[in-house]
Amino acid sequence: MTNRELQCTVAINKIFCYNPRLSNALFDEFGSFEPLFNMTYSQLKERFGKHYHFFDLLCDKNTIDWAEDEIRWASSERIKIISRSSPEYPTRVVECADPPALLYVKGDIDLNRKRIISIVGTRMPTRYGIESCRHIVGELKENGSDPAVVSGLAYGIDVSAHKAALDNGLDTIAVLPGGLDNIYPAAHNEISDRIARHGALVTEFPRYTDTRKINFVQRNRIIAALSDVTVVVESKERGGALITAELAHSYSREVFALPGKISDICSQGCNNLIAKNIANIFTSVNNMTEYLGWESKPKPKITQGKLFCQGNTDKEKIVVALNNESELTKNDLFRLCNLGLPLLSSLLLEMELEGTIISLPGDRYCILRH
């Protein structure tokens, strides 16, 4: 692709960011986007039969100037811009009805790798949901499937899936609802840096994109399209995870949902997906991978959870406190362990990264049972 063609693609992506079906129709008709920028206003009007608002943008020199600046910025940040015509563009996404004109990718990962799984769920999961998420990812590593794990970097199940992938040495891909200049949510900046080193951050949105509700739906379609299979761990009766599952189903992808009690609010969405035959019932990782035809070779488990954090009495205080209760808030731990709040916060973060504890919504913590 020439620099001019890339400029035109970047410009088109901005113009039709919220209407990818139209940009795809134009691409299919013209073979590339460059011919559109070579046409005069009168030629565009003659070609399309009447006036459309995007004529003004196509004929405005500032549009290409903006695109050129966007390309320079991406290069300076080591962000790849992968156009639909590039061999690096994920073929799974091209197969769907509404692929974006391009993808911004920060990281080094093959988006066309053999196995990719998306794991999504509620932003307010239960302990059961978080532990199930970590178990699923751990089992995918142990049975030798080794897929890349895709999610949306949101609070709850999404970020738990990313963390579990990183902890188990699996590549992970975070699909964002905004530009790479403004990670959302900002609280996940640190883990987004880790993801970029061990996978990739992916988005279709250019710089300075406002975070709108529609962005999350568009983000979800890429999560669904990138993957061979989508697993919904927990979801209420309504939520973004259900949208992702329904999109995956519409793309003829496999969908699995973790069942729960009919009285559990966070399992209502999963149970409904199963009842409507949108999702297969998730019973185990081995059953799922066998269903998918993923040949696997079990790997010996080489790590074992520790009951105590030897050599650090402050961490041992936290472990003892959590072992006596199913879960505790940070304020509870502050009161029980007699540790300063800054030290406690630092230790909790270290222990979560070490895989000793897990954080739950509402500033709560519990022991990670291995």
Image (tube, rainbow, N blue to C red):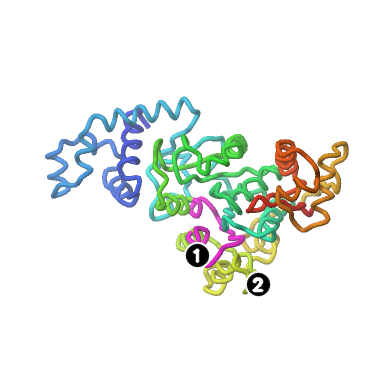
- 224 part of magenta stretch: yes
Identify the amino acid type marked 1.
Arg
Determine if residue 191 is in view: yes
The answer to whether any part of residue 85 appears in the image is no
| Residue that badge 1 annotates | 238
- Horizontal placement of 278 versus 146: left or right? left
Q: Where is residue 348 in the image (x, y as percent from the top left)?
A: 73, 42
The residue carrying mark 2 is 261
Highlighted range, magenta: 223-243
**Residue at figure coordinates x 74%, y 50% from the top left:** 332
Closer to the chain start, of discs 2 and 1, is 1
Q: Is residue 10 above or below residue 228?
A: above
Question: Which residue corresponds to the image point at 44% horizontal and 43% vertical from the top-left?
Answer: 178
Residue shown at the point (57%, 55%) measured from the top left:
123
| Nearer the observer, 125 or 206 | 125
Can you tell which quarter of the image residue 256 is in?
Answer: bottom right
The stretch drawn in magenta includes residue 190: no
